[in-house]
Amino acid sequence: MLLVTTIAAVRARREELARLGRRLAFVPTMGALHEGHLSLVRLAGEHADEVWASVFVNPAQFGAGEDLDRYPRDLERDRELLAGAGAVLLFAPGVKEIYPQPPATVVDTPGLAAGLCGAHRPGHFGGVALVVAKLFNIVQPHVAVFGAKDAQQAAVIRRMAADLNFPVEIVVAPTAREADGLAMSSRNTYLSAEERRAATVLHRALQSARAAALSGERRGPALEGLLAATVGGEPLARLQYAAAVDPTTLRPVPAVKGRVLLALAVHLGGTRLIDNLLVEGLE
Ligand code: AMP
């Protein structure tokens, strides 16, 4: 697998690919890869002739006091894992390559970024949308794959790509989970053994709210109350938000019709974890 650190080198490879008429799928990541990322790479391979990935810990999406400095980094390991999953090129630029000067341009989706994580991480989704727009322009993929684990991020990127006419198909891959249901995340490595055990509360809360929805509970606030109650039963967990929203608009749904996205953010010690579940077929 080719490791590339400059935009110029990506563009040169991209031109070659265009000459060969090959279809390109792209998986952007922040590294510290786990099986969830690799499932995206494998799915990407089903949509294209070639898969490229990126590893870039994007400063623009971290707020003051967040974990930018301690975010786990291990490029050599990431490189091996990506090659094993079938990626043929890894773009791993430095910060100066992506941000040679502070950007004067804003890429944002205020309506989609206002609630859920956006309410607690001001500027986060603007930073995500900006770097993904830049990566799309650099890599020019036909297909880009994102994880359902970050449902708000996927909604923001889908809309950004549609609004700005990026010629890219956005594919959203299912959330990869540990055997006990915990959604895989690079941030799980921050958890102590006790916190790791307690972390299953996110999945348990989502499952029990889903069961309630499937057995007839259609009131959004009641579903949110159920999520919060389950999290409240875990002494190590501190709820940041529990939400029942429309999966496209991300607006709260007073009365569920058809489908609902259940979403949670929870602190365990100093670690913030998110998870969500899309419940469909609710007539
Ligand atoms: P990150 O490195 O956390 O920025 O994630 C890179 C991509 O991997 C994003 O599209 C995430 O949504 C996706 N991802 C992260 N964790 C998972 C998971 N457990 N299952 C599926 N996709 C994931």
Image (spheres, rainbow, N blue to C red):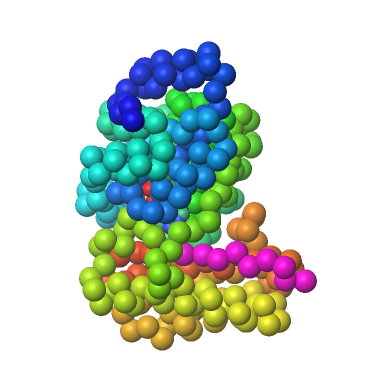
Q: Quadrant of residue 262?
A: bottom right
Q: Is residue 70 visible?
A: yes
Where does residue 58 sit, x and y in percent of width and height?
34, 41
167 to the left or right of 106: right
Q: Is residue 19 left or right of residue 201?
A: right
Looking at the picture, how far across and down is residue 210, in whole percent? 59, 75
> Looking at the image, which residue is at 46% across and 20% down?
14
Left or right of 101 in this view: 145? right
Residue located farthest toward the right when viewing the structure as drawn: 283
Residue 262, above or below 228: above
Residue nearer the viewer, 262 or 197: 197
Q: Which residues are magenta?
A: 274-283
| Residue 43 percent location from the top left of the image | 52, 45
Q: Relative to 6, does residue 204 appear above or below in the rendering?
A: below
Query: How far from the left and from the top, in percent, is residue 232?
Result: 42, 83
* Quadrant of the image containing the N terminus: top left
Name the quadrant containing residue 57: top left
Which SS type dominates the magenta stretch? strand
The answer to whether residue 102 shows anywhere in this view is no
Identity of the residue drawn at 71% across and 81% down: 216
